[in-house]
Amino acid sequence: MSTGNSSADVVIVGGGPAGRALATRCIARQLAVVIADPHPRRVWTPTYSAWADELPSWLPDEVIASRIQRPSVWAEEQKTLDRAYCVLNTSSLQLFLSDTSAQFRALTARTLSPNSVVCTDGTQLTGSVVVDARGTDLTVTTAQQTAFGVIVDRALTAPILGGGEAWFMDWRRDNGTSDADTPSFLYAVPLDDERVLLEETCLVGRPALGLRELEARLRTRLHNRGCEVPEDAPVERVRFAVEGPKDSSPGDVLRFGGRGGLMHPGTGYSVATSLAEADAVAEAIADGGDPEAALWPRSAKGVAALRRVGLNALLTLDPAEVATFFDRFFDLPVEAQRSYLSDRRDAAATAKVMATLFRTSPWHVRKTLMRAPFLR
């Protein structure tokens, strides 16, 4: 790592997938980039997944570890989705996004302004543009997603998958819970040809379910389905905020990735969106334009507002209503599902999906959905 102050076209604070994706696309446009991160050599361990049609064309196929052509869901009954889903190879993704001429600095940012970063050791990084890509912050007031998972040999998962390729969501109550308990679902996806991730997930909560509770539910569910997990099976623990900081950017610093509102608050997905939006931001920077406007046109702001209403609905649904809500959602045509889950620039399409979902839901679910816009 180099020492002393640094100057570049773009200074990115945060070296996770979002920050490195933006750096990669800036460098492709001949921009000099400095990335400040306290632990730039830290190995990424989370499982990153995405719908196949969300991934940008510049991302090589080598970063895709497995491709599920038709994942399944179970809310009130089983449904098969006609939309390909991918699990990314985390190490390959990190290697690809790190194979650039970016200058990595093992530094912790203290204060940010639109053109400079002052670090805790006094180092100053200056650039034409400063980008805050440090991810979301866990606080007691932010809605969070939590999950506990185990990684097992594919041969053990036949009774779990039931002949299907993967469970995107399985809300059945064979995890030891009743209709009165906060629900969680099974997420079961192949990581490669030999391993499968089996994960009990609390989609969103304020507060979210604890990891010990999720572990107990997962082990109960797997036992009930005849899958005995080896004691030494690798585990995955997940906890992150699905909401970005509510305060405005200090000094109008550009935010990107989860910190910049690119996480879908109703699903917790942000990596694919960050990868896809990196080009628009990098192009605006290279052309001397307004990267904030490129990232957040009026339509995108409209979608974000509608998604916040959707988050409120999820947080307010009675436990017994959750399965019904998702059963109606996955009854929608796949294009409508894609509009809500993936399209952040078509507010009219998002509003149409939400209106359809409201219209087709039972009255007791509608009453909850009607309250959602007024919740904070």
Image (cartoon, grey):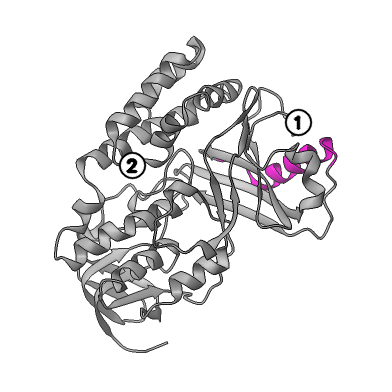
Q: In the depicted view, which residue is nearer to us: 260 or 108?
A: 260
- Indicate the position of residue 366 as horizontal and vertical percent values: 45, 15
- Residue 174's disc is 1
Amino acid type, callout 1? Asp
Which element carries disc 1, helix, strand or loop? Answer: loop
Q: Nearer the N terminus, badge 2 or badge 1? A: 1
For residue 210: magenta?
A: yes
- Indicate the position of residue 244 as horizontal and vertical percent values: 38, 49
SS majority, magenta:
helix
- Residue 266's disc is none
Residue at mark 2 to residue at mark 1: CA–CA distance: 35 Å
Q: Which residues are magenta?
A: 208-226
Residue 374 in view = no
| Outermost left residue | 288
Residue 191 shown left or right of residue 36 in the figure: right
Q: Which residue is mark 2?
A: 344
